[in-house]
Every structure is written in C-alpha cells, then in structure tokens.
Amino acid sequence: MNEHDKMLKIVIQNLEHELPAVHRSSIEQVARVILGEDVESSMGSLAVSLLQSNVSVGHILSALLRCEWLSVQHLIETSDPENIKQQVKQFSDCVDHFNILQTAIIDAADQRWQGALDKEVKLRVIAELRRLWRVSGEVLLHNYFDEIPVSARVDFKEYKKGFLWVSMTRDLVTMFAAAPDLRTAYITSPDRVHSLIVRGVNKGDDKIMLEITGVEVSLRERRRDVRVKLHQQLPITLIHQGRAIEGTIEDISCTGIGVKFPDDGVSLLHNQKVECHFALGKEVLKGSDATICWSMEINSEFRVGIQFKPMSIKRETIYRFIFVQEQAIIGRLRKLERPSWMKDPIELRDPEE
C-alpha cells in the first residue's frame, strides 16, 4: 500500500467515526475530495448525502476540517521540498476541492433551512386565512392580466388537508381565464405580506376545488400606483453619463417604468441616475431625475426598473395614458374564453385518493 492509499484509509476511518450515518460510498468520495482528487459524484449530491445524516452542519464541517488538516500535514511530510511548483499545485488542488465541497454543504443547508421556513410561513398563513374564511364565509381570490388586478369574491365551502372548496361564479371564471396557465390564482394573507398560490384542480356543478401549492411574498399587492403592461412597443431613450441608450418600455405607472434593452452591452446598476425621454401619444415626456431601482436579466433580456422622482415628470399625462390602456386591457379581458377545465361539471375527486 503506497502513501496515498494509506492516507485515504486514515481519512475514511476518521470520517466514518465522525459521521457514522453517512453511506460508505459517500464517505469514500468525500475522503477523495479532501485529498484533492476528482470524483464522479457532484459536490451538490455529496453535500446532500452528508446532510441526510441529520448531523448538524457545524459538526459536519468540523469533521471535514479535521480531515483536511490531516491531508495538509500529509502533503507537508511527503512532498518534495525541492519541487516548489509541485507543492503549490498539490496544495492548490487540495484546498480548491475542499472549498467547493464546503460551499456546496453550506448552500444545501441554506436551501433546507429556507424550505423549512417556507413551510412554516405557509402553515401560518393558511391558519390565519382559515379563521378569516370561517368568520366571513368568503374567499377573495385574485390574479393579474397585463399587470391589472382581476379579483373574485366567492363563498367559502370547505378546507381539508391543503384543498379548498369555493363557490362557482362568473367572476371566478374570468379571474382564472386571466391566468397565463388558466389555473393559478392568489389569496392574500390578512396582513397583506404573503400570498397563497392556489391551483384549480376540479369543478363540480356549483363549486371549485383548489389545491394550495405554495406561498410567496406579496409585492404587487402593495403597489401604491396602478401599473399596466404594454402590448405595443413604446420606445424610450435613457441618458446616462452623457450616453444615449435606446430601449423599450415594458410597463408603466405614474411613479416609474420597466424597460428592456435589445443591446446586450447595456449595463445599468441599482441607484444610478438617468434621464428618460419618451412619447405618450403626441406628448414627449422628459424625466430629468430618475433612478434605477433594480436591474436583472429576465428571459435572456436585460431589464431595469426606473423610478421617477416626485414632481419630475407630468403625472397627469401618464394618468390619462394608463386609463386608456386599462380600458383596452378590460376589453381584452372580457373576450377571454372560459378555461377548458371549468367548462363541464365533472365529479370532484377526494384529495386523499
């Protein structure tokens, strides 16, 4: 047995002692990572296998660090002191592999923690809404059609193990028809901080069964101003540090706009100042003092959110423009067809089946 194999055996024995619940195959691959080797398994899958042992993240990382120190001592003792280049490469490979695994463990633990937190929030929001439904006898669902809220107030029928039954109304049909997938809707928590995500499952003669699929932070519900999404391209020119940048307005409110850019080379960062030049009808508007409030890539397009400084742009012109857009959106909304799953009464299935 050569020196490397001896060290591998020592590291495996230490890991098995520290982490007895982890499968032998995972222990061996982790040991090889600590010694700077490439392994077949991804770092993510190794991290998950370690966390499945239900040992604390701190204990796992401590055990790995102790084994990493054994590996470093081994390198010091066995590497050729005359060959500096080889020493540096060995130490670099060892540290790089270990750091990648450590980062994967922390990320996996963070995702697990976030999942547990999301579950706790979901249960709390459901409990609060169930009390409200029983007292009021009503459920208020909503959706968005080109950023315009579409709501339906329906009778509360029953709640059981993640499934909600509500009455069938014309407003409910319209509200679901407005959803991109024709099945998803939202129910805002009493404090308006979160929204339950519900999905239409089945339809009976006079009621609908909804499955509660998740919870999210309610951002759109807390907007102070109406925002509309534009169907026709509306060009805009931004001036940043003396440079003119051409883009297209995606949505607009009286306090800001969403803009996308055809040029991949555009880079605008949070809190940067810009000037906005665009036309609404025959009137040209100039936002002389605007700020980038977010920037990100969405569907391979670079987009930014721009906030106008109060009194820096003609709000009454934007109000009139938004009103016209709202009427057009309402017209399109009225022409939407009933979702196919809501057309014919079918036997409602038991969620426990």
Image (tube, rainbow, N blue to C red):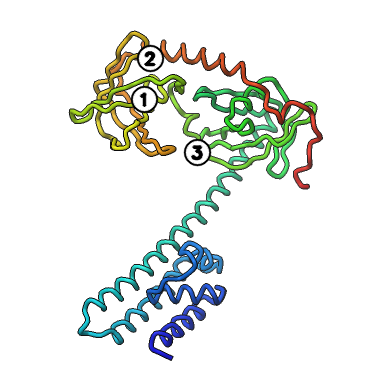
Q: Residue furthest top?
A: 282
Mark 2, other Cα within 10 Å: few <14 / some 14–19 / many ≥20 = some
Judging from the image, what secondary structure is the residue with disc 1 in? strand
Q: Position of residue 319 (x, y in %)?
A: 41, 13
Amino acid on which the number 1 mark rests in the picture:
Thr
Between discs 2 and 3, the one toward the N terminus: 3
Residue 89 in the figure: left or right of residue 8: left
Mark 1, other Cα within 10 Å: few <14 / some 14–19 / many ≥20 = some
Q: Position of residue 351 (x, y in %)?
A: 75, 43
Q: Which residue is mark 2?
A: 318
Residue 238 in the figure: left or right of residue 4: left
The Cα–Cα distance between marks 2 and 3, rounded to whole angstroms, is 28 Å
Amino acid on which the number 2 mark rests in the picture:
Ile
Judging from the image, what secondary structure is the residue with disc 3 in? strand
Q: Toward the viewer: 228 or 1?
A: 1
Q: Toward the viewer: 268 or 126?
A: 268
Q: Which residue is mark 3?
A: 217
Q: Which residue is mark 1?
A: 248
Q: Which mark is residue 263?
A: none
Q: Is residue 91 above or below residue 175?
A: below
Callout in the foreground (2, 3): 2
The Cα–Cα distance between marks 1 and 2, rounded to whole angstroms, is 16 Å
Judging from the image, what secondary structure is the residue with disc 2 in? helix
Quarter of the image for the N terminus: give it. bottom left
Between discs 3 and 1, the one toward the N terminus: 3
Q: Residue furthest bottom?
A: 1
Callout in the foreground (3, 1): 1
Q: Is residue 251 above or below residue 89?
A: above
